[in-house]
């Protein structure tokens, strides 16, 4: 049977989503099972162990490491303030008394009689985790966090930069194939999730950032501009921790690429509603794609189209590599025999009819199915 | 259990990779071992299966179907072989779940730090970071780093035997303060190997024994003049089995199926390369270019080295090749004009959709240009680590050594290189073998006479682990069924003007001898028989060196190959491409044409 599977990103109006919100270390869970939470509700809190400072007492006091325990002013485990004398000793035949001051506030963690080092641990660093999406706490992970469940529209992008944020959706570009005009962005867009059509330039991103836009969702963006935005060439696709002042989600890829009609119309239909957006992308080991979640109060059954979709004659698909990159068409044939490409590689292919009626033979590895 | 190679007639070997589990069946046919069939199935370490043996069984079932005989009895490998059923030996390697990830530490970065790194890499690990007293980071920064990364294992080294105890204790204290956690979960202790100054072992035990799964092995750098990496490498393999693999889904079961310990995949590849170099008495380089990483293995002067360039690869890491090499270095290999913005977008689109393949010839050429730069950078990293021991001059004081930034001289001597083996999709599956040959030549710039081969189906891991119990079977299958001999490259060292007389080559074999004078600046292809040997005599002009000295002739027996003998007179030390765009494109096109590398001009 002419049938194959292609990678696909989820774009659905009705999804049931669960997001685990877990602390990096054990701590305190601040909410209860069944509780309704907003994106900015703090659900768990902890303290990371403070930074460690080492103080070489033996060297500073010019004494043998074996004697440092006699020289410390407070026992191991006691708290000290910056500048407090933590150890003292006599030198130059006992004529001069030296003392060593604590380099920071903290607790004396250990003192070694082999190296003569004192280890001072600074105050713990507080860490809080928010709910990120509006929804209900359906599970409490004791001492670690919660699982928040929400229902609503869900769009996966292909690549993003910037962390988690949220705000009302605002279509700004005139359509899925339009380019965002930097002049169209102003103070009214502060805190919004801006829909930008097929493409935006570096100047347009800067305009968004300056206006305080929370996130931009767009079909494509130039790598050249990404480099300018990040201040470096992005080597490996592990993102989400950049501090850019906004989150950028590409739904289609790099270059100017019309946003898929389904994605555009779904997001436009949710204009004004609050979306939670994350740019975090990891393409290696355990693929993670950026996402836009628009929680709704609908009770429609979840139409989950998870991951790979079958490729069959008639399937709507997009070509994801040159020479037909970005073009959308329908599969008309899936020949079983291998086909020699222009590159001379023999691979399995799909015959595609594009929207203008033109036909082309494309490797199956180079198409992705678009859900309808 | 002792295995007698004389009783082994059939062998099943699997390699559990991150995405695919590959199984091969080897049988004795007459006096020789041969590859019979291979099968593969998706690896099943991740959810929903979370049991590596499912994928192994699926791959073995494919082998059963192709070989037309049973190997399994239900979900058990029948061993030893009974009649037509089962195999006499089952062995396996694994890199599933991201392979073995380690952190290493030494006192001085360029000395014990580097030795520790070589020990870990040679055992098949990915080295996440090297921590040393003089690495430029303050103690709290080292502690933060140790905490952030979650290694599978830590190798702690430092000091020569009888040397400074205090500094080793300092490194152990840093480790205690960091209290690092193991990657695969918090319910077991992190394995730590101590391979430093023997006199400091009691102090290290006192600090670490109760907090980690500590193993103390002989010092990997007992004196400045001597490196002793084997005990540390063996301990890494042992702990990999005991602590890391035992916590990966299904591996406990898999380990009971084989009488031979499961090895990390790259460690096994290193073994087979080492054995082939030893058998042939020649220097060998092996390279495996994958989607995310590129591994380089070498044996020079009998010393084995391995490096892994974790972020140089053809799909997931393709964008990093551009970031590290610079776009102009990629474009210099492309014989047509490309818009830079367009090329950047293409490379990023490959990164975000890593499974796509080149459709047009132009796209293939660009992909192969990127591969040249990935291979070149990986080889540069390899040369920097495959070096002689540093800091052995006795007149130096320790402060000189602490501040030295000069590399020890590299062991990699391209004129000594006898065999260059490439593997990984972009080399093994290049539509024409000449493309693979040219990519390797451009990236490694071999000098003098070097034989070229590709590993057709990447069996090296399985053969590496097999070589630990049956070396003859492993090297025989490697030679007969695994390697595709491409031929050889003859590259005189020296520079000159285009068209100037450079080298005269004569090939004599079964037919009439062929003699060809090749001027400077050319690539010329002389056919070789696909099988069998020929004799090569070559005389370089004054000023050019083929390995015997400037102007001195060489003679060598040459193995056949599917591409032929490539005479490369484009110059070495330096090798340069023309600066002008039009001239560069013209030269690239001429060289491609000489090798019939592409079906049409690109």
Image (cartoon, coloured by chain):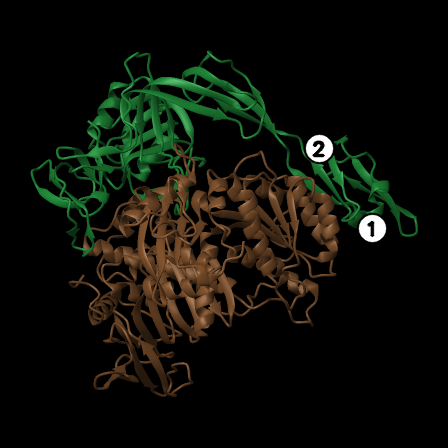
B133 vs B455, left or right, is: right
Residue at 50% x, 51% y is B259
B17 vs B102, left or right, is: left
Cβ atoms under marks 1 and 2 closer than 8 Å: no
Q: Nearer the viewer, residue A305 or B166?
A: A305
Residue at 47% x, 67% y is B299
Rendered hue of chain A is: green
Residue at 71% x, 47% y is B205
Chain at tag 2:
A
Label 1 sits on residue: A62
Residue B123 image position (x, y, % from top left):
52, 55
Q: Which chain is brown?
A: B
Residue B99 image position (x, y, % from top left):
46, 47
**Is residue A82 visible in the rendered structure shown here?**
no
The numbered mark, 1 or 2, whose residue comes first in the sequence reads 1
Indicate which disc residue A105 carries: 2
């Amino acid at each position: 049977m002419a049938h194959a599977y292609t990678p696909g990103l989820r774009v659905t109006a009705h999804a049931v989503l669960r997001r685990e919100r877990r602390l990096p270390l054990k701590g305190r869970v601040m909410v209860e099972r069944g509780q309704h939470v907003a994106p900015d509700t703090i659900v768990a809190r902890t303290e990371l162990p403070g930074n460690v400072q080492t103080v070489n007492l033996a060297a500073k006091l010019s004494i043998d490491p074996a004697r440092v325990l006699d020289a410390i002013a407070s026992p191991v485990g006691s708290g000290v303030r910056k500048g407090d004398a933590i150890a003292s000793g006599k030198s130059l035949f006992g004529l001069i008394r030296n003392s060593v001051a604590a380099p920071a506030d903290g607790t004396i963690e250990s003192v070694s009689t082999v190296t003569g080092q004192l280890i001072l641990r600074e105050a713990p660093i507080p860490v809080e985790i928010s709910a990120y999406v509006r929804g209900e706490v359906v599970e409490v992970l004791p001492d670690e966090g919660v699982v928040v469940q929400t229902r609503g529209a869900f769009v996966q992008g292909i690549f993003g930069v910037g962390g988690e944020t949220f705000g009302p959706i605002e279509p700004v570009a005139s359509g899925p194939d339009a380019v965002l005009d930097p002049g169209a962005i102003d103070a009214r867009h502060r805190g919004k999730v801006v829909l930008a059509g097929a493409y935006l330039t570096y100047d347009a991103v800067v305009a968004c950032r300056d206006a305080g836009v929370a996130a931009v969702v767009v079909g494509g963006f130039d790598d050249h501009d990404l480099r300018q935005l990040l201040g470096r060439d992005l080597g490996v696709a592990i993102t989400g921790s950049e501090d850019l002042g906004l989150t950028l989600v590409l739904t289609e890829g790099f270059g100017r690429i019309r946003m898929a009609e389904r994605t555009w119309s779904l997001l436009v239909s949710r204009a004004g509603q609050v979306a939670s957006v994350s740019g975090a992308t990891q393409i290696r080991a355990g693929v993670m794609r950026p996402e836009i979640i628009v929680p709704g109060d609908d009770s429609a059954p979840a139409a989950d189209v998870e991951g790979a979709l079958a490729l069959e004659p008639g399937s709507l698909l997009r070509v994801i590599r040159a020479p037909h990159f970005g073009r959308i068409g329908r599969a008309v044939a899936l020949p079983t025999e291998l086909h020699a490409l222009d590159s001379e590689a023999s691979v399995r292919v799909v015959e595609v009819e594009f929207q203008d009626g033109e036909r082309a033979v494309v490797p199956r590895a180079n198409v992705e199915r678009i859900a309808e | 259990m002792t295995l007698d190679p004389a009783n082994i007639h059939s062998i099943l070997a699997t390699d559990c990779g991150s995405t695919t589990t590959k199984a091969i069946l080897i049988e004795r046919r007459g006096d020789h071992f041969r590859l019979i069939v291979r099968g593969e199935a998706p690896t099943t370490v991740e959810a929903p299966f979370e049991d590596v043996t499912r994928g192994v069984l699926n791959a073995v079932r494919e082998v059963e179907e192709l070989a037309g005989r049973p190997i399994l009895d239900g979900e058990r490998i029948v061993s030893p072989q009974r009649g037509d059923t089962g195999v006499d030996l089952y062995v396996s390697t694994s890199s599933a779940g991201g392979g073995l990830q380690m952190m290493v530490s030494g006192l001085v970065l360029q000395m014990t730090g580097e030795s520790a790194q070589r020990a870990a890499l040679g055992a098949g690990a990915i080295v996440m970071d090297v921590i040393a007293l003089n690495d430029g980071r303050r103690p709290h920064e080292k502690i933060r780093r140790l905490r952030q990364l979650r290694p599978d294992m830590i190798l702690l080294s430092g000091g020569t035997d009888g040397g400074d105890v205090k500094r080793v204790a300092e490194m152990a204290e840093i480790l205690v303060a960091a209290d690092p956690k193991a990657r695969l979960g918090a319910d077991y202790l992190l394995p730590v190997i101590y391979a430093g100054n023997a006199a400091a072992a009691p102090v290290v035990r006192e600090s670490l024994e109760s907090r980690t799964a500590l193993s103390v092995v002989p010092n990997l750098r007992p004196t400045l003049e001597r490196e002793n990496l084997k005990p540390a490498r063996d301990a890494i393999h042992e702990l990999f089995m005991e602590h890391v693999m035992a916590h990966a889904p299904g591996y406990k079961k898999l380990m009971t199926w084989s009488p031979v310990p499961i090895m990390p995949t790259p460690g096994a590849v290193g073994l087979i390369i080492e054995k082939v170099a030893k058998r042939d008495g020649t220097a060998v380089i092996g390279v495996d270019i994958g989607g995310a990483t590129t591994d380089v293995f070498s044996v020079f002067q009998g010393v084995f080295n391995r490096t892994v360039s974790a972020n140089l690869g053809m799909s997931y890491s393709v964008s990093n090749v551009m970031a590290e090499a610079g776009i102009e270095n990629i474009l210099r290999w492309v014989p047509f004009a490309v818009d830079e913005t367009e090329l950047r977008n293409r490379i990023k689109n490959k990164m975000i959709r890593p499974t796509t393949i080149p459709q047009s010839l132009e796209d293939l050429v660009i992909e192969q240009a990127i591969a040249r730069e990935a291979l070149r950078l990986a080889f540069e990293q390899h040369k920097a680590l495959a070096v002689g021991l540093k800091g052995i001059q006795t007149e130096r004081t320790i402060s000189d050594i602490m501040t030295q930034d000069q590399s020890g001289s590299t062991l990699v001597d391209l004129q000594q290189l006898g065999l260059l083996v490439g593997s990984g999709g972009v080399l093994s599956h290049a539509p024409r073998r000449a493309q693979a040959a040219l990519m390797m030549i451009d990236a490694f710039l071999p000098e003098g006479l070097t034989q070229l081969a590709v590993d057709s189906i990447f069996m090296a891991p399985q053969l590496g682990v097999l070589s630990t119990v049956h070396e003859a079977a492993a090297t025989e299958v490697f030679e007969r069924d695994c390697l595709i001999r491409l031929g050889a490259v003859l590259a005189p060292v020296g520079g000159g003007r285009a068209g100037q007389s450079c080298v005269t080559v004569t090939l004599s074999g079964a037919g009439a001898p062929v003699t060809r004078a090749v001027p400077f600046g050319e690539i010329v292809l002389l056919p070789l028989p696909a099988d069998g040997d020929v004799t090569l005599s070559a005389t370089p002009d004054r000023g050019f060196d083929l390995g015997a000295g400037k102007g001195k002739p060489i003679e060598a027996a040459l193995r056949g190959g599917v591409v032929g003998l490539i005479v490369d007179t484009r110059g070495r030390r330096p090798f340069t491409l023309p600066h002008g765009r039009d001239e560069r494109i013209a030269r690239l096109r001429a060289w491609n044409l000489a090798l019939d590398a592409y079906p049409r001009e690109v």
